Amino acid sequence: MPVTVVIGSQWGDEGKGKIVDLLSAQVDIVARYQGGANAGHTICIGDETHVLHLVPSGIFHEGTQCVIGNGVVIDPVALMEEIRMIRKLGIDVAGRLFISHNAHLIMPYHKRIEEVRERARDAGAIGTTGRGIGPAYVDKFARTGIRVVDLLDRDVLRKKLRLNIEEKNAILREVYKEEELDVEAIVEEYVEFDKLIDPFVTDTTALLGEALADGKEILAEGAQGSLLDVDFGTYPFVTSSHPTAGGACTGLGIPPTAINRIIAIVKAYTTRVGNGPFPTELDDEVGQHLRDIGHEYGATTGRPRRCGWLDLVALNYTSRINGFTELAITKLDVMSGLDQVRAATRYEVEGGKVTTRFPSHLEGLKKASPLYETLPGWSENLTQVETLDGLPEAARSYLDFVSKNLNVPISYVSTGPKRSQTIAVDGVAA
Ligand code: IMP
C-alpha cells in the first residue's frame, strides 16, 4: 500500500520540511493533514531559502500534486499570500494544488480571542504561535466553524460570519473587557475570497481515494510534533490537533490500512518553542551551542528555541504511539564540536523511582529528572559527508545507539539544510 507518513517525533521543528521535500520527488501526491499556518517548513533549494506555512513543499516538484486536507485549519489571507509567493517563483499552482472543501477557516476573531486569552493566562500562557489555531479548532468541534466550502456561497458565509462575530464580540466585551470587532468589515473582506479560492477547492478525500485505487504514491505530511499532539502531547502545552499518525487518517480521509511507512523525523538533539516541561533542557553553553550552530529560532515566530539533549524516553513513547517504521535523523552536523554527547534513557520520577516510561501527565513530567548515557563527541565537520562510512566513528556510534534504543532502523541522516546534504542509508532512495 502506498502511503508514507512523515511525522515530527519531538516538539516540532525536527526538519520535516527537508525530508518531505526530498521524498516529494518520488511520490505522486503530498498531502498535509493537520495544523495551520503555525507550522513553518523551511526548504533550501540551491542558495535560496523558502518558508512554507500551509502549502506542502511538494509544490516545488513539477508533476507532484499537493493537497491541503480536511484536518488543516486554513487562514485564507495567509494561504493567498503563500500562493502569490509561489507564483512569483515562476511555479504554476493551477491544477496542482487541491484544498479540501471541508477544511475549517481561521478568522480574525480566532487570532483576537487567542491573543486576549493568552494575555489573561499570564504566567500560565501556552506560548502559542498567535495564529488563531486553537480557537479555530474549538469552533470546529463546537460545530460553529466556517469551512472552505462556505466561502463559495456569499449568503451562507454572511450569515455564519455574523453569528460567529456577534458571539465572539460578546466574549470580548463581557469576559475580557476588550474592544469588539467590526462585523461588516470582516464580512466584506471575506466574501471576496470566493473567486480566489474557488479554483483550488475540491473533495480531496475522493481525489486521494481514487489515487490510492490507481496505485499512486501518497506522502502524508504532518506539522508540529508528536509531543504537541492534543491527546498524546504535554497537555495543555500542546497544539490543538493530531500531528501523530492517526491524524493522517482523520485529517485526509484515508484508511489506516493504506499506510505502509511511518517515518519519524528525529532531530539529533531536542528543541521546544513555547512553554511547558522539557526534561533534557540545557541552560548552559551546550544549549547555547545547539541554538547558535543549529540556528534554533522559530520559522514562524522567530522565537529562540529551547535546546537540550536527545530524550529517548520521550522518543520511545512517541514511537509507541505512532508505530515508527524508520528514522530520519536530522541536524547531526550541529553536534560537532562537543566533547561528549548525551541522551536520556531513563527518568527518575517522584519517590526516586527510575523508569523508561514517559509520564502520562504534566505534574509527573515536571518532576522527572533525566538519567543520561554519555558517549564520546566528535569534532569533525559533517556537512560534506556523503556516506555513513564517511562519518566519524563517534557520530556513527551515536546513531547506532539511538537506533538500537528505539529499535527502529535509520533511513536518512541529514547533515545540513541543503537537499544534497542527506545520507540515504543503503537500500533507501534519496
Ligand atoms: P499553537 O499551535 O499556535 O496553538 O501553539 C501551541 C504550542 O505548539 C506552542 O508551544 C507553540 O510554540 C507550539 N507550536 C506550534 N506550531 C509549532 C511548530 O511548527 N513547531 C514547533 N512548535 C510549534
Image: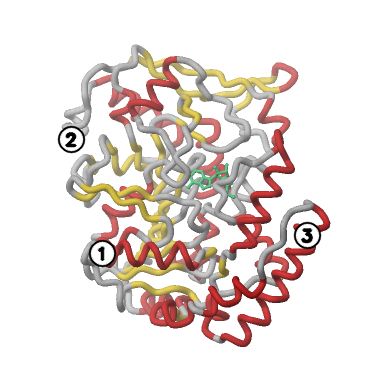
Q: Secondary structure at mark 3?
A: helix
Asked which quadrant contains residue 91, the reply is bottom left
Residue 159 vs 120, above or below: the answer is: below
373 relative to 17, above or below = above
Q: Residue at x 63, y 85 (%)?
A: 156
Mark 2 lies on a secondary structure that is: loop
Q: Is residue 39 above or below residue 397?
A: below
Mark 1 is surrounded, within 10 Å at the Cα level, by few (under 14), some (14 to 19) or many (20 or more) other residues, namely: few
Q: CA distance from mark 2 to mark 3?
A: 58 Å
Give, as a three-letter code, the residue at label 3. Answer: Ile
Residue at (62%, 87%) from the top-left corner?
155
Q: Determine which residue is flagged by label 2.
A: 387
Cβ of mark 1 under 8 Å from ligand 1: the answer is no
Q: CA distance from mark 1 to mark 2?
A: 36 Å
Instruction: Tell me which label, 1 or 2, sits earlier in the chain.
Output: 1
Category of crowding for the residue at label 2, using alpha-carbon neighbours closer than 10 angstroms: few (below 14), some (14–19), many (at least 20) = few
Q: Which residue is mark 1?
A: 88
Q: Position of residue 247 (x, y in %)?
A: 54, 59
Rendered location of residue 429, percent (x, y): 22, 52
**Which amino acid, by three-letter code, is at mark 2?**
Thr
> Which residue is tagged 3?
171
Q: Residue at x 16, y 36 (%)?
A: 386
Q: Look at discs 2 and 3 and give the one toward the viewer.
A: 3
Direction from residue 137 to residue 74 in the image, left or right:
left
Q: What amino acid type is highlighted by mark number 1?
A: Lys
